[in-house]
Image (spheres, rainbow, N blue to C red):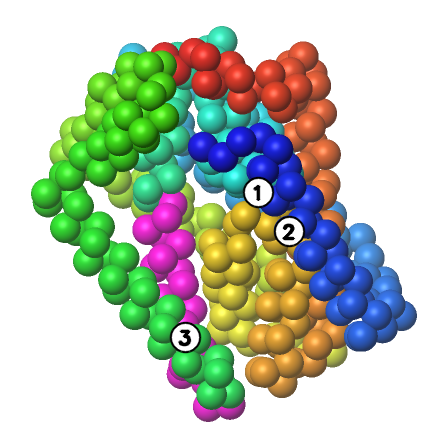
Amino acid sequence: MPSRPSLTLAGVLTTAAGLALFVWLVWYVGPAAIWAGFRQIGWGLAAIVAIAGLRFAVRAAAWQRCLEPPHRLRFADAFAAVVSGDAVGNLTPLGPIVGEPAKAAFVRARVPIGAALTALAIENVLYTLSVAAMIAAGSIALLLRADVAAPLRNAGEIAIAGVFGLYVVTLWTLWRRPAVLSRAVAAFARWTSSASLGARVEKVKALEDQVYTFASRRRHALLPLAALELAFHALGVLEVHLTLWMLLPQPPLLITSFVLETVNRLITVVFKPVPMQVGVNEAGTAVVTQMIGMGLEVGLTLAIVRKARILFWMLVGTVLLVRQGLLTRRVLEDAHVHPE
């Protein structure tokens, strides 16, 4: 893993670049136009924040169902851990690499960290597959529009091809069950001469086995989990649709909200190293809304509203960490020191 100074420098540089892009976009579109959009939304922002909270609740419920008996986790604890882990992940260029261990460390008093991390790994695999399906479906919906610009059409075709490749690799992986992660950890341990990392290879191999065999062991859990992942994306579309409904003089088409949520998912995946995707989310959303005839102002305002609800839930997550008597550094050290 890269040294902490290099990660800090990377975070500072990506955040600074994102902020510079954000400021330029606001200046180009005009602060008055953005403020007018916010005034139109008004107290509707509370509903948008509430929908985002429901999305955290859905991911928390999915995590609960991925835990192996006899381990159990109360919904309130899972929800608090998901919100806190998301706050930690949004603040660093490593994203889920630190956010997921932070969730497990948050509930370490109720569930062994090893069991919590295994359940999180399984849920993240299912979530990743659902995101890929969402991107493919949104790209198809985009291509069905008659007014799609050539660059956007090309991006949609590339996204569909990428998702198809991901599912092919996933099916091959589930069939062959290669020990990719454990072998990578073992190779890295040899390269760095790390005895502590080498001692974890078998634990990583056990985690891989748990992920590979989850579907065969817990068939009854697959349908509820698929429904929860679908609900997460449906709520995302609802959030976009509600925001556009408050911003535009005419109610938006549902397919438009679906496409814009797909763009948001794609930007989040591609630019996860950028803390909060600051700047790039605003730019990407504004470019797409411009290409589909809605204008830069709508896309930029939509992205800024999204950023406002992210900041709200980041504050909630930070408060939850403080109430636990934990700092971000302490949570991550606990996850590293106590893998089980």
Compared to 240, does 90 lie above or below? above
- How far separated are the C-alphas under marks 2 and 1? 8 Å
Side of 217 where 21 appears, left or right: right
Please tell me whether mark 2 or mark 3 is closer to you in this view.
Answer: 2
Number of the label disc, if any, that sits on residue 231? none
Counting other residues with Cα less than 10 Å from the Cα at mark 3, is it few (<14), some (14-19), or many (20 or more)? many
C-alpha separation, residue under disc 3 versus residue under disc 1: 26 Å
Per the image, the residue denoted by label 3 is 156
In the image, what residue type sits under mark 1?
Pro
Quadrant of image for the N terminus:
top left
What quarter of the picture does the C terminus occupy? top left
Q: For the point 65% across and 68% down, which residue is it?
A: 283
Determine the residue located farthest toward the top in the rendered image.
109
Q: Residue at x 76, y 69 (%)?
A: 25
Looking at this rendering, what residue extends furthest in the left direction?
176
In the image, 314 versus 172, the foreground residue is 172
**Can residue 47 be seen at all in this image of the molecule?**
no
Give the mark nearer the N terminus: 2 vs 1.
2
Q: Main secondary structure of the magenta part?
A: helix
Q: Amino acid at mark 3?
A: Gly
